[in-house]
Image (spheres, coloured by chain):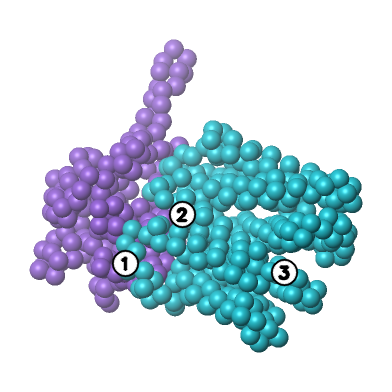
Chain colours: A cyan, B purple
Amino acid sequence: MRNKDWTLVFFTSLSQLSVGVVLCFTWLVYVENDARFFMEMGLSLKNPVFLALFAIGLATVISFSHLGNPSNAPKSMNNLTESWVSREILALAVYSTSLLIAFVLGWKNWNVEYLSYLLALSSVFGLAFLWMMIRIYVIPTIPPWNSWYTALSFISTTVCLGLITILFLHYIEFANVGCVTCYARFIEAQTGKTLIVSLTLIVLIEIISGFYRQSQLERMNTGIDELALNKGAFHQVFIARMVMLILALLILSVFLLKPTLLAENDHFIWIYPLLALLIAQELTGRLLFYSSYFRIGV
Amino acid sequence: MTRLAFYFDSSSCSGCKTCQMACKDKNDLAIGQVWRRVYEVTGGGWKKQGEAWKQDVFAYNLSMSCNHCEDPICVKVCPTHALWKREDGIVQIDQTSCIGCKYCSWVCPYGALQYNPEKGVMGKCDLCADYIDQGKNPSCVDACPMRALDFGDYQELLDKYGASDHIYPLPDHSITGPSLCIKAHPNANKPYPEVSNIEEVKIA
């Protein structure tokens, strides 16, 4: 791990959380027509649109600390014809602007009928932004990143963080009004089930691809850098991430198989460790991604 | 169209690192900045055959800087266009436009781009473009006591030396098309070579 790469861990994770929240919320708005009226739409982190805007804003601020000379940042869109970094920054600007407009419309209750269209547009810009972020890391001279895993990793982080955040926001709404029964009903309802099943599938995909990826890295010739990716700190962090994912999978299994039992016994506080585990494992996964860097040549 | 390039004779290089020092001196580089590096490649060992010990130990050196590639990956990825290519093929950096994102240093397979923490920008070999514009040679070429380095048009160097081998630990030249002609050391084709001064070249 080189110095200052922590900023990239947080920049990419927060950006992907933002896009994931927008994608999941847009999906909810289209599946459940009253979703936007149920969710908080004001100036609060309980508002999914504001949360996504806050996350992308924070990610942007953090990204500046990665730069050695941030005063030149306005020039970073000079190479749109060739550089994926330039394109990513343009996509980030467009995505953030569309999200800001969607937030203001919802917050001020202006032209609310257009909100769902604007959310759909933000989702499209968010997906474009995610694609640019993936392309930055698919580089022929960096074998561990130049693979399908980079795309799968970034997409699964986006969906995983988006799903758990939306699930958590639903929980907060129910907890605020003290309606445990409502929560049980939500978990049993089609939307709740779909959210949990999707999250379970994503966690399963992350476990399977994580183990597969590790076995791939162990077989790679790391050239003159002579990195050891199958022992030492790298391997221990990988094992820690897998343990977190398996624990999250166990909690999700209880949600899936015994939702009523959990709600009736007031045990739905399990959403907190689930949220903490999933955020921690995503940050760990991104740390492992950057730590796996080596390039061909000298 | 001119395509300026370096020539390096690995069979003549003694590994004295005068080229490295000449580059540091000319460009006034601080500790940790080495735009030309000398890699020491070693391999082989001793084996007992009957009552005798036989050795197949070998070593050679490789002096490497920016290769001013024909298809420079650093120029492609730079978001600010701080990296650009002159008409004579020299890849240059405009430090007043660099944001110090270090993306170019991630991708260059020759380790040519180096971050200057004091200035917050990247730096690299520019083939002593100012000297070339004055009709002089790059400082490393003139400094080499073994005359293992030369520079000139890529095609003319190929015609003059007839060399284009790309030896360990260099990557496949088809990736970026380096403007580099190498005369390989006779030991460069031996099995299991490794860079023995890796800490020196990475931290120097």
**Marks 1 and 2, Cα distance to the nearest angstrom?**
17 Å
Pointer 1 chain: A
* 10 Å crowding of disc 1: few (<14), some (14-19), many (20+): few
Pointer 3 chain: A
Mark 3 — residue?
A39
In the displayed structure image, the side of residue A209 where residue B15 appears, left or right: left
Look at 70% across and 45% down and name the residue there.
A273
Question: Does the residue at mark 1 contact the one at mark 2 (Cβ under 8 Å)?
Answer: no
Q: Earlier in the sequence, mark 1 or mark 2?
A: 2
Q: Which corner quadrant of the image does residue B60 belong to? A: top left
Pointer 2 chain: A
Look at 34% across and 37% down and name the residue there.
B199
Mark 1 — residue?
A71
Q: Is residue A77 above or below residue A198?
A: below
Q: Nearer the viewer, mark 1 or mark 3?
A: 3
Q: Earlier in the sequence, mark 1 or mark 3?
A: 3
Look at 23% across and 62% down and name the residue there.
B126
Residue A148 visible in the shown view: no
**Marks 1 and 3, Cα distance to the nearest angstrom?**
39 Å
Which one is nearer the viewer's eye here, B107 or A68?
A68
Mark 2 — residue?
A7
Kind of residue sitting beneath label 1: Ser
